[in-house]
Image (spheres, rainbow, N blue to C red):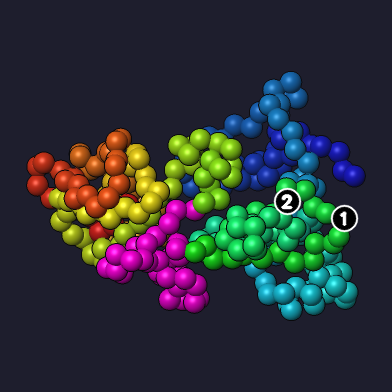
Amino acid sequence: MKPATSLASYLLSFLTGIMCLSVCATGQDLVVDAVPSHVTNEFSPFRALGSTVDRIEVKAADKALEQPMLNEILGAGWQVISYRQNTELQAEAWHWNTDGTWSDPVGQGYFIGQATPSAASLDHSFGYALPHRGTTMDSVEQGFHYSKLPDGDPNTYWKSNPYLSQHVTGEDDSLLPQWVILDLGSVQKLNAIRIAWGEPYAKQYRVQFWTGGENHPRYQATSSIWQTFSQGIVNDSRGGTVTLPLTSKGPAMSESSR
């Protein structure tokens, strides 16, 4: 087991190497403080640095995580290897533990896996598309569930992620706000939005617009900001179908709204 390494001393050689590059390129000074008494935190490079195996099918996992392939992976110098499903990118829920309970006792609805593993080996974990959710773009590309939000059918609906609700997390819903983006395809003038709420519905919400113009917020999230419409804050929603005026000074320009 390798001992923990102070942050200052571990980064010293790396930062010294880039110091000249930084100074030569931008004319700025980079100061490295390696005084042991100034260390604010420590970490173990052996545990903190590594790589991941990302979203592979069951048959591929069975072959990749056994010999002789396993030795090749462990000998590649990646150190600690973790496995992830990237379900957060696919509007899915990740069930790493197949032991758990269902919201409907007959064995359907929403599944919640046990927080601690059982004695049995956990060879596989699964990502499941959330009902009534979906992302329209990813659905086209990979065959996941379509988002029903913009289909114009009042009998279908989009549903927020129940795994982020207070019932599951034990935390107030305000700590994990949920949102949905409407891509209008091009810059449009907006002064109102009509929402048909289902049950249950959001009691507090806000409507915002993207200030980045043609810069897509999904791929260029740091290029601009989401700005709330002047009348886009609702603190006492009563559900139903509501037409919400967004501005009193004329329509705002936006390509995306949420």
Q: Is residue 106 left or right of residue 229?
A: right
Find residue 96 and report its horizontal and vertical position in percent: 70, 58
Depth check: give the residue in front, 238 or 176: 238
Depth check: give the residue in front, 209 or 80: 209
Earlier in the chain: of badge 1 and badge 2, it is 2
User: In this view of the protein, can residue 9 be seen by the observer?
Assistant: no
Q: Is residue 189 left or right of residue 142?
A: left
Label placed on residue 114: 2
Find residue 12 and report its horizontal and vertical position in percent: 70, 38
Label placed on residue 119: 1
Quarter of the rendering containing residue 170: top right
Disc 1 residue crowd, few under 14, some 14–19, many 20+, Cα 10 Å: few
Label 1 close to label 2 by CB (< 8 Å): no
Q: Residue at point 11% right, 41% down?
A: 248
Q: Which residues are magenta?
A: 132-161
Depth check: give the residue in front, 138 or 10: 138
The dominant secondary structure in magenta is loop
Disc 2 residue crowd, few under 14, some 14–19, many 20+, Cα 10 Å: some
What kind of element bears circle 1?
A: loop
Q: Residue at point 43% right, 57% down?
A: 159
Find residue 167 and report its horizontal and vertical position in percent: 56, 43
Q: Residue at point 30% right, 35% down?
A: 235
Q: Is residue 190 left or right of residue 27?
A: left
User: In this view of the protein, can residue 185 be seen by the observer?
Assistant: yes
Q: Is residue 43 above or below residue 36?
A: below
Quarter of the rendering containing residue 98: bottom right
Find residue 33 and report its horizontal and vertical position in percent: 66, 28
